[in-house]
Amino acid sequence: MDRFKIGVIVGLMVLGLGVVGLWLKQNKLAERLDLFITSQQLAPTPSLVPSPSLIPSPGLEPSPSLIPSPSPSSVFTPAATVQWQPQNIYLGSASTTKTEWTETSAAIQLKSSDYPAEVKAVFEGQLSIVNGEAWARLKNKTSGAIMQVTEIFNNSNTATWKNSPAFKLHSGTNSYVIELMSTSSEQANLSGARLKLSL
């Protein structure tokens, strides 16, 4: 066997030994990697271990500061109920010497739907006359209806407030005018007049 063949054989042997060494190193590295992965899987995760400060002690109530307060939007506040208030509607003043019912310039227009259905009205007038009687009443000028329930009178020369019984406003929009009358042709004076509306 010549030297060339011997050199080739020796080279192949060295190469084979190198391959075997690399294979052994690779196996050792694989074993170490498996051991590392196994140790990581068995080790407890710190984020999953509850902190002692978060574990409630027995017999202790939660602090009020930790209980969430309801937001303002979740708190129901009942709306305030607005109640209808009594009203005084002033009609003006007038006078007459006529002995029959006479319309005056004292008038008012009212719409019944502007008020509660159960509202009631009282006609009040401040009347005076020297002799005889001074009378006043309301008339629905829109319908022509005489409102006899509103008739009031005074037989004194001292201006005195007189009032009628309560009555209901006529349905719809109506003009109410004051009528005056003197029983003696003396001047009947109406110093002031008003409608008092109430429930």
Image (cartoon, rainbow, N blue to C red):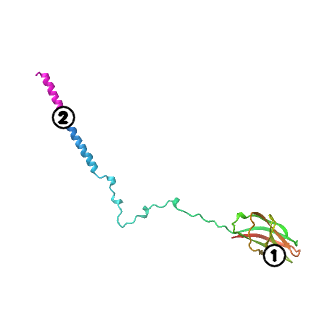
Element on which disc 2 rests: helix
Count of marks placed on residues: 2
Classify residue 49 by image quadrant: bottom left
74 lies left or right of 51: right
Local packing at callout 2 (Cα closer than 10 Å; few below 14, some 14-19, many 20+) is: few
The percent coordinates of residue 75 (x first, y second) are 52, 62
| Residue lying at 26% horizontally and 48% vertically, measured from the top left | 39
- What amino acid is labelled 2 in the image? Val
Q: Which mark is residue 153?
A: 1
The percent coordinates of residue 56 (x first, y second) are 36, 62
Classify residue 57 by image quadrant: bottom left
Local packing at callout 1 (Cα closer than 10 Å; few below 14, some 14-19, many 20+) is: many
Q: Which residues are magenta?
A: 1-19
The percent coordinates of residue 14 (x first, y second) are 16, 30
Q: Is residue 93 magenta?
A: no
Mark 2 sits on what residue?
A: 20
Task: Report the mark closest to the observer, 2 or 1.
Answer: 2
| Residue lying at 32% horizontally and 53% vertically, measured from the top left | 46
- Mark 2 and mark 1 lie on one chain; the one further toward the N terminus is 2
